[in-house]
């Protein structure tokens, strides 16, 4: 398909987002940007969160990773599900009782300004890296399909995507994101289902035969109980719980969406419904991964060294114009839905926690908010370009390894604040949070040198949080 036609489809989709932004933002103010005026319908938030959580990483990298690690990723997703239940039943009611905008402000009483700002700062670093990883893969596909044939560089493609995201979110922030993400989730899931259906039709075999071949394939194996494997069930399941609590329960991005609901009960209902939809959606992506490998074997298509490229190759070049169009729309939805909420959450956290924007005049609030929003878009651009030049592995692995190092201290500080009866020495909180990722890295290197078959996986976040929590205990006194 002509790249000009694909580009026109991409721009049409963006214009639709602008129309949503225009209607949503007609009565917006600074409070709308941060909290959506607490008027978001819970079912809209729940459905939209599916797309924002999945992102381009899930759309491209998870199906590709099936060839490397089968369905073992689903063990991690089961842990995610358990983590979402904990967030819905324990954390969300707590945040509503505190009536907060930035979730890190709940740390102020126990951990002091140092703990409060350190944790917020680690979130900002973590989110910039995470948002960059998520947008990177979607932008790469858009570049390969559209901008590269038109002679446009990858860097210009990324910058263009971020400018578009800034245009439809800078006015209303989270109020726009809640509604735009609902559209983007629908587009994303439609693209996945259409691609699976097109592959089954193309192979010209009965659905029952196709299902049997998929189920008997080595690529659909879910459980791995080998003790030294990075895909060991217990490592992945427990890591899934802790990563979910850290990346969702202690993450301004996800919690901010929940806090736009009218009440604690509706936010809890939203999270519970979302968790079920999330598990179903991930299983769909794994099925998609199995089908593209079946398709590649059937048509003797070479598997790329970077498996992230397999789905784009098949969707754009082997399944017809209809699937190609849906694929571009799906990847556009994935790119926008993850990056728009990330930049909004980053802006909220920095403005509330560091700039103390609530105490300033409305005109100054708006000006500061717009500049901060713009700067975070530029920072994400820089990280994406660096990742493009340096990365050589599956993005889904890269993102959770990075999260293990950056979110571990966040998890430790919140856990210490909630459960420890000791009071930390405030001046040591920042050094502890910086030291724990370094010690975690050294620990995993040491263990792998002793136990040859050991390879660090998603459990990095647990090791990191335990080290940080232990250090906080050491530098504390009875409260």
Image (tube, helix red, strand yellow):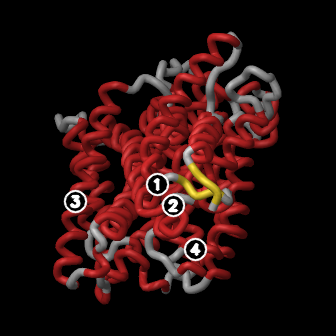
Which quarter of the rendered picture does the N terminus lie within?
A: top left
Q: Nearer the viewer, mark 4 or mark 2?
A: 2
Q: Is residue 25 above or below residue 270?
A: below
- The residue closer to the viewer here, 95 or 470, is 470
Q: Where is residue 412 shown, x and y percent of the image?
A: 59, 49
Q: Where is residue 192 shown, x and y percent of the image?
A: 56, 49
Q: Which residue is mark 3?
A: 374
Q: CA distance from mark 3 to mark 2?
A: 31 Å
Q: Which residue is mark 2?
A: 111
Q: Where is residue 435 shown, x and y percent of the image?
A: 47, 35
Q: Which residue is mark 1?
A: 426
Q: Nearer the viewer, mark 3 or mark 4?
A: 4
Q: Which residue is mark 4?
A: 95
- The residue positioned 21% from the left and 76% from the top of the image is 366
Badge 2 element: helix
Q: Local crowd at mark 1 within 10 Å, few (<14), some, or many (≥20)?
A: some
Q: CA distance from mark 3 to mark 4?
A: 28 Å
| First in residue order: circle 3 vs circle 1 | 3
| First in residue order: circle 3 vs circle 2 | 2
The part of the image, by quadrant, that contains residue 232 is: top right
| First in residue order: circle 1 vs circle 2 | 2
Q: Nearer the viewer, mark 3 or mark 1?
A: 1
| First in residue order: circle 4 vs circle 1 | 4
| Labels 4 & 1 near each other (Cβ < 8 A) | no
Q: CA distance from mark 4 to mark 1?
A: 23 Å
| Labels 1 & 2 near each other (Cβ < 8 A) | yes
Q: Where is residue 210 shown, x and y percent of the image?
A: 75, 36
């Amino acid at each position: 398909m002509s790249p000009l036609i694909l580009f026109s489809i991409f721009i049409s989709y963006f214009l639709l987002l602008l129309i949503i932004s225009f209607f949503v933002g007609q009565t917006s103010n600074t409070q709308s940007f941060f909290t959506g005026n607490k008027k978001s319908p819970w079912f809209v938030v729940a459905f939209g969160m599916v797309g924002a959580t999945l992102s381009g990483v899930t759309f491209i990298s998870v199906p590709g990773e099936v060839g490397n690690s089968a369905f073992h990723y689903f063990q991690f997703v089961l842990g995610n599900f358990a983590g979402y239940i904990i967030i819905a039943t324990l954390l969300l009611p707590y945040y509503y009782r505190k009536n907060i905008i930035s979730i890190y402000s709940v740390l102020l009483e126990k951990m002091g300004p140092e703990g409060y700002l350190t944790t917020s700062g680690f979130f900002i670093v973590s989110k910039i890296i995470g948002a960059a990883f998520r947008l990177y893969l979607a932008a790469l596909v858009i570049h390969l399909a559209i901008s590269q044939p038109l002679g446009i560089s990858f860097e210009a493609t990324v910058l263009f995507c971020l400018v578009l995201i800034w245009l439809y979110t800078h006015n209303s922030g989270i109020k726009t994101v809640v509604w735009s993400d609902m559209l983007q989730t629908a587009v994303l899931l439609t693209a996945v289902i259409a691609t699976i259906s097109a592959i089954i039709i193309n192979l010209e075999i009965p659905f029952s035969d196709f299902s049997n071949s998929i189920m008997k394939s080595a690529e659909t194996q879910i459980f791995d109980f080998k003790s030294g494997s990075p895909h060991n069930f217990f490592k992945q399941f427990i890591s899934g719980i802790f990563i979910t609590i850290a990346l969702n329960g202690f993450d301004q991005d996800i919690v901010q969406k929940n806090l736009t609901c009218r009440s604690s009960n509706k936010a809890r209902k939203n999270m519970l419904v979302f968790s079920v939809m999330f598990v179903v959606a991930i299983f769909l992506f794994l099925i998609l991964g199995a089908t593209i490998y079946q398709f590649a074997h059937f048509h003797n298509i070479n598997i790329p060294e970077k498996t992230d490229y397999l789905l784009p190759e098949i969707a754009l070049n082997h399944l017809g114009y209809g699937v190609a169009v849906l694929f571009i729309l799906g990847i556009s939805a994935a790119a926008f839905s993850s990056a728009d909420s990330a930049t909004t959450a980053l802006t909220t956290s920095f403005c509330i926690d560091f700039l103390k924007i609530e105490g300033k005049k409305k005109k100054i609030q708006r000006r500061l908010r717009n500049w901060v929003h713009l700067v975070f878009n530029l920072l994400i651009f820089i990280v994406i370009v660096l990742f493009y030049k340096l990365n050589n592995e599956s993005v889904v692995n890269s993102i959770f390894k990075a999260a293990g190092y950056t979110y571990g201290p966040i998890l430790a500080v919140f856990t210490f604040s909630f459960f420890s009866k000791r009071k930390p020495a405030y001046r040591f909180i920042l050094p502890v949070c910086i030291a724990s990722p370094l010690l975690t890295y050294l620990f995993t290197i040491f263990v792998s040198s002793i136990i040859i078959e050991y390879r660090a996986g998603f459990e990095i976040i647990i090791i990191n949080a335990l080290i940080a929590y232990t250090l906080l205990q050491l530098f504390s006194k009875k409260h």
